[in-house]
Image: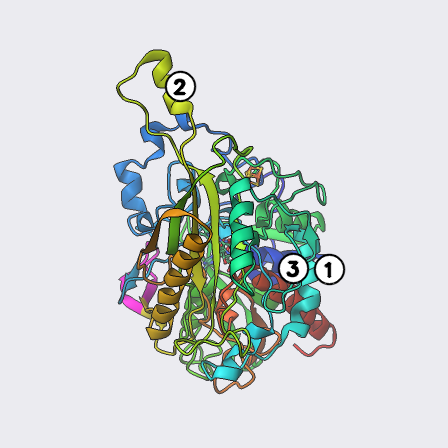
């Protein structure tokens, strides 16, 4: 590719190696390159260059065969993912091939992956929230999982740092449980959302409804364009108006001249040298040629996404680490978490027939957590909490099939009723028995062991879901909506695409894999800063926290390197 140095053949030794180029890997690459380290990013999929490699970004519905549906071959390729409802003709090329990359579900689990440069940063929903001490102190307070080795004050400057570069739009509220970001101007609520907001805030003390906080630009920022409200983001944005590795961090890393990115490089293991007592590099299989190559470096960031990162570490065995790199505690692969969602309520809103909205705003509303935030809001049914996402919109108008010609066209052009829905996102506890393990009986296309996933939501998540539905119905009915219906789509973990916890951070090497700076306790030149590192799951979307932890860890890594500590 013209704009990236992909020639990793002439040099097998680097200052730093980053495994994966998604949200967290992109940040690791940018930070390490900007701090002067010659950095090799190893990405298992192809190069996706910003704009150049977004083939469907300008497609209209009539440009797609089968009304945007998949062919039988494509359905076969995505036979697991298809359950998500997200994969269509316009984004199919950005989702991993389930046939080439099988996994085994001991219990139902949907593992959604993006195997290309940029990873899932091309596909994500961009909802972006800071965590608070309510989250970082939760395990210590209620005894589930282990204590986080950090608190909000440790990560706060790094939230600001990544937000300033990424560009986050939103409204400040001053809530302790949902700290404000460094914001670009917020997007606007539509008339019905304003109406529902007013009613909810008036009738329910302590509940707020705001426009979602999103990694979209509401004004030009750092050379990138403003969001045009076209909601075709998952195909890649020609304006660079939402945060992705492709549009934001990798170009910044590339601009330093320190970046080499090697596509089609499936990292198999981190190589640990027993004599030196540290990791010395990684081993890859070239996805196209099956060639096996070893690369060396002083530090290694493993950012392959939560499950893949743990998978790589589990396969990284040596005399010192017979059960996987850094697995002295036996916790590697355990404590898998995801958020519950798709539980909530929907209803119709009378009035506002003469109102509409402009464009397709790629965002909705947010109702921050209001339970278990203090003594007054304490629940005796569950620990932790939930927030709501949703939106108000006008439905389609059923065509008057008895008409034809101009009458028919008129009837289908008229907007339908206003509707409004909310769906909760609930925190999942870190259970030791929610886990992944190596499966040597089912091999991938390259003959390598795959993963078996064995995880489920348990009683606490079920109790949270029950409350979500009850509260959602009550809020919408109180807000004056009609035909309000609660729903619970009862999905297993994975659908939230917020997998976390498989190599958790902690204070004690006996019960955790990583320390407070995301270093493997017993191999300090190996860093894990994707979802695998998370010690609990909060109820808000996690990717901003991965970004901040990554920038913080990269800063620490370079400082330790300069002091010859790693
Ligand atoms: C539809 C959807 C909506 C979402 N909405 C939100 C949201 O609103 N807010 C939010 O916070 N999060 C959201 N997420 C989740 C978000 O996308 C992830 O949290 C985030 O992308 C994780 O970043 P990562 O760096 O860990 O992994 P990824 O972004 O998945 O990147 C991992 C990279 O590693 C590469 N890789 C994997 N294995 C290997 C290997 N062995 N060798 C080399 N490379 C490898 C992959 O190809 C990929 O490029 C959403 C996800 C989806 C799919
Ligand atoms: S909605 Fe905004 S961010 Fe999404 S593709 Fe359109 S312009 Fe880009």
Whether the magenta-drawn stretch holds residue 444 is answered as yes
Residue 93 is at least partly visible in this image: yes
- The quadrant the C terminus occupies is bottom right
Provide residue 358's location: percent of width, then percent of height.
56, 33
Towards the viewer: 89 or 525: 89
Ligand 1 within 8 Å of the CB at mark 1 = no
Label 3: which secondary element: loop
In this rendering, position of residue 505 left or right of residue 329: right
Residue in the picture at 68% in, 47% down: 185
Element type where label 2 sits in the image: helix
- CA gap, disc 3 and disc 1: 38 Å
Label 2: how many residues lie within 10 Å, few (<14), some (14-19) or many (20+)?
A: few
Residue depicted at x 38% and y 36%: 89
- Return the disc, 2 or 1, that comes first in the chain's sequence: 1
Residue drawn at 56 percent across, 37 percent down = 229
x and y percent of residue 28 in the render?
62, 60
Residue 561 appears left or right of 25: right
The residue where tag 2 is placed is 410
Q: Which residues are magenta?
A: 439-452
Which SS class for mark 1?
loop
> Which quadrant, please, contains the N terminus?
top right
> Mark 3 near ligand 1 (CB under 8 Å)?
no
* Residue under label 1: 36
Please say whether residue 192 is one of the residues in the magenta stretch. Answer: no
Q: Nearer the viewer, residue 22 or 446?
A: 22
Position in image of residue 174 (x %, y %): 67, 63
Q: Which mark is residue 173?
A: 3
């Amino acid at each position: 590719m013209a704009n990236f140095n992909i020639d990793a053949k002439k040099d097998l030794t680097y200052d730093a190696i980053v495994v994966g180029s998604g949200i967290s890997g992109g940040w690791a690459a940018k930070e390490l390159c900007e701090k002067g380290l010659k950095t090799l990013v190893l990405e298992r999929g192809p190069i996706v260059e910003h704009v150049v490699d977004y083939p469907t970004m300008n497609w209209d519905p009539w440009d797609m065969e089968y009304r945007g549906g998949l062919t039988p071959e494509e359905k076969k390729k995505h036979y697991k993912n298809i359950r998500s409802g997200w994969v269509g003709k316009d984004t199919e090329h950005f989702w991993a091939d389930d046939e080439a990359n099988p996994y085994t579900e001991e219990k139902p689990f949907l593992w959604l992956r993006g195997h290309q440069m940029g990873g899932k940063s091309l596909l994500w929903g961009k909802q972006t929230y800071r965590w608070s001490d309510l989250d970082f102190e939760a395990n210590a307070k209620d005894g589930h999982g282990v204590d986080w080795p950090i608190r909000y004050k440790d990560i706060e400057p790094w939230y600001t740092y990544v937000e300033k570069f990424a560009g986050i739009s939103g409204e400040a509220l001053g809530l302790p449980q949902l700290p404000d970001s460094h914001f670009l101007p917020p997007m606007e609520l539509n008339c019905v959302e304003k109406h529902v907001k007013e009613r909810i805030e008036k009738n329910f003390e302590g509940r707020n409804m705001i426009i979602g906080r999103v990694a979209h630009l509401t004004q030009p920022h750092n050379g990138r364009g403003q969001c045009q409200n076209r909601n075709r983001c998952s195909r890649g944005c020609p304006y660079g108006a939402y945060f992705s590795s492709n549009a934001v961090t990798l170009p910044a890393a590339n601009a330093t001249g320190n970046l080499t990115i090697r596509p089609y490089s499936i990292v198999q293991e981190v190589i640990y040298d027993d004599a030196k007592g540290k990791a010395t590099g990684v081993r890859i299989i070239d996805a196209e040629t099956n060639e096996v190559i070893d690369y060396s470096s002083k530090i290694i960031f493993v950012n392959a996404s939560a499950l893949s990162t743990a998978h790589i570490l589990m396969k990284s065995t040596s005399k010192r680490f017979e059960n996987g790199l850094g697995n002295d505690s036996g916790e590697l692969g355990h404590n898998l978490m995801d958020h519950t969602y798709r539980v909530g309520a929907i209803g119709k809103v009378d009035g506002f027939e003469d109102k509409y909205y402009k464009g397709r705003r790629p965002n909705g509303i947010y109702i921050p957590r209001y339970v278990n935030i203090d003594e007054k809001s304490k629940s005796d049914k569950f620990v932790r909490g939930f927030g709501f996402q949703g939106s108000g919109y006008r439905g389609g108008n059923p065509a008057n099939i008895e008409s034809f010609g101009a009458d028919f066209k008129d009837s289908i052009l008229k907007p339908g009723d206003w509707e409004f829905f909310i769906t909760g996102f609930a925190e999942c506890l870190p259970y030791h028995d929610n886990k992944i393990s190596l499966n040597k009986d089912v091999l991938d296309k390259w003959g390598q062991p795959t993963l078996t996933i064995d995880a489920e939501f348990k009683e606490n998540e079920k109790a949270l879901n029950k409350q979500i539905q009850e509260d959602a119905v009550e809020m919408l009915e109180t807000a004056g909506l009609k035909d309000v219906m609660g729903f619970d789509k009862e999905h297993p973990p994975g659908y939230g695409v917020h997998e976390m916890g498989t190599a958790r951070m902690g204070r004690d090497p006996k019960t955790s894999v990583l320390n407070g700076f995301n270093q493997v306790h017993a191999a300090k030149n190996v860093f894990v800063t994707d979802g695998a590192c998370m010690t609990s799951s909060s109820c808000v979307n996690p990717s901003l926290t991965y970004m901040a932890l990554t920038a913080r860890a990269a800063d620490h890594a370079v400082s330790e390197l300069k002091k010859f500590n790693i």
